[in-house]
């Protein structure tokens, strides 16, 4: 079945440092979505990437879709304590089935 | 944004009992809803796809007779954990995708707040 790995699994950073999480798929993707889950909360949609090589920005967050559409990254510049949480990528299987598979997630801790 | 509610938010039950969890889309219609299970510090594992007016589609390894899903209306899906055992204790989250109705991979998922189930 489809596998979606994220690295790193955990990341602790000092407030103000940058952070990057990578999402890697074993198959070519039609699109990829990113979600954030705060501790004790539920996933919240952040952004979607569709085109090969696409780059999107949301304030301090930069999202990139790989040229081969098999991987993606989320970069946070100058982290803040409000960035704490787990970041998940989510993909749909290449079989065309209407469902979403979540990546393994990267848990971010920001130390003040 | 779209709102999805889940009820109850927390439930503790005895082993052998059944527990029903409701997922509602409050401000949009959802012909499809997804049920996920999340163990502590782990990712969301898709359990099943709930389809309004038809049978749910279960993921491999998920027992359909144990996790009964009913999608009776365009805004409500229910998950019933039958004969619950301690190993069923988990965080159960539903989501409802919202798009143009064409069921595209680009639809955005809106998640309910989740239900924490503890089976004693």
Image (cartoon, coloured by chain):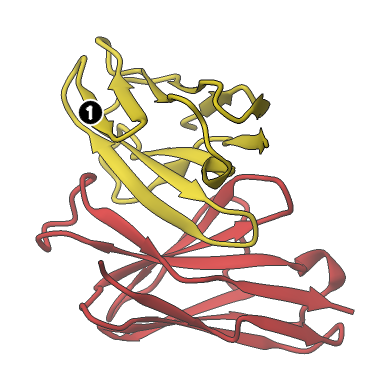
Q: Colour of chain A?
A: yellow
Q: In the rendered image, what is the letter of the chain coloured red?
A: B
Where residue A20 appears, x then y in whole percent?
50, 21
Q: Is residue B42 left or right of residue B36?
A: right
How many C-alpha atoms fall within 10 Å of the one at disc 1: few (<14), some, or many (≥20)?
some
Q: Residue at x 79, y 75 (%)?
A: B118
Query: Chain for mark 1?
Result: A
Residue B77 is situated, as x and y percent measured from the top left of the image, at: 41, 81
User: In the picture shown, does residue B16 fall above or below B63?
Assistant: below
The residue indicated by pointer 1 is: A56
Quadrant for residue A54, please give it: top left
Total marks shown come to 1
Q: Secondary structure at mark 1?
A: strand
Which residue is at 68% across, 73% downward? B116
Q: Position of residue B80 (x, y in %)?
A: 59, 82
Camera-side residue of A86 and A80? A80
Instruction: Please tell me whether residue B40 is drawn above or below residue B78 in the rendered image.
Output: above
The quadrant in which the C terminus of chain A is found is top right
Please report the residue visible at 37 percent of the width from the left and 75 percent of the height from the top. Answer: B4
Residue at the outermost right position? B120
Residue visible at 26% across and 39% down in the picture: A48
Along the line of sight, which residue is nearer the eye, B15 or B42? B42
**Farthest residue, direction top:** A67
Query: Could you say where residue B112 lies in the image, as x and y percent from the top left?
Result: 45, 71
């Amino acid at each position: 079945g489809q596998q979606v790995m994220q690295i790193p699994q955990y990341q602790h950073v000092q407030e103000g440092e940058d952070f990057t999480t990578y999402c890697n798929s074993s198959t070519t993707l039609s699109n990829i979505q990113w979600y954030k889950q705060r501790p004790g909360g539920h996933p919240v949609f952040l952004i979607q990437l569709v085109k090969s090589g696409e780059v999107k920005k949301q304030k301090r967050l930069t999202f990139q879709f790989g040229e081969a559409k098999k991987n993606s990254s989320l970069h946070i510049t100058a982290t803040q304590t409000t960035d704490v949480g787990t970041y998940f990528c989510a993909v749909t299987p290449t079989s065309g089935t209407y469902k979403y598979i979540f990546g393994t997630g990267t848990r971010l801790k920001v130390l003040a | 944004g779209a709102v999805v509610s889940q009820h109850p938010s927390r439930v503790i039950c005895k082993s052998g009992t059944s527990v029903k969890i409701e997922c509602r889309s409050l401000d949009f219609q959802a012909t499809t809803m997804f049920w996920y299970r999340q163990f502590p510090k782990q990712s969301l594992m898709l359990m099943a796809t709930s389809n309004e007016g038809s049978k749910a589609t279960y993921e491999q390894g998920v027992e359909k007779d144990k996790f009964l899903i009913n999608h009776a209306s365009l805004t409500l899906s229910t998950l019933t954990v039958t004969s619950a055992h301690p190993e069923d204790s988990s965080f159960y989250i539903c989501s409802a995708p919202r798009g143009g109705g064409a069921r595209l991979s680009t639809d955005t998922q809106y998640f309910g707040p989740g239900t924490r189930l503890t089976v004693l």
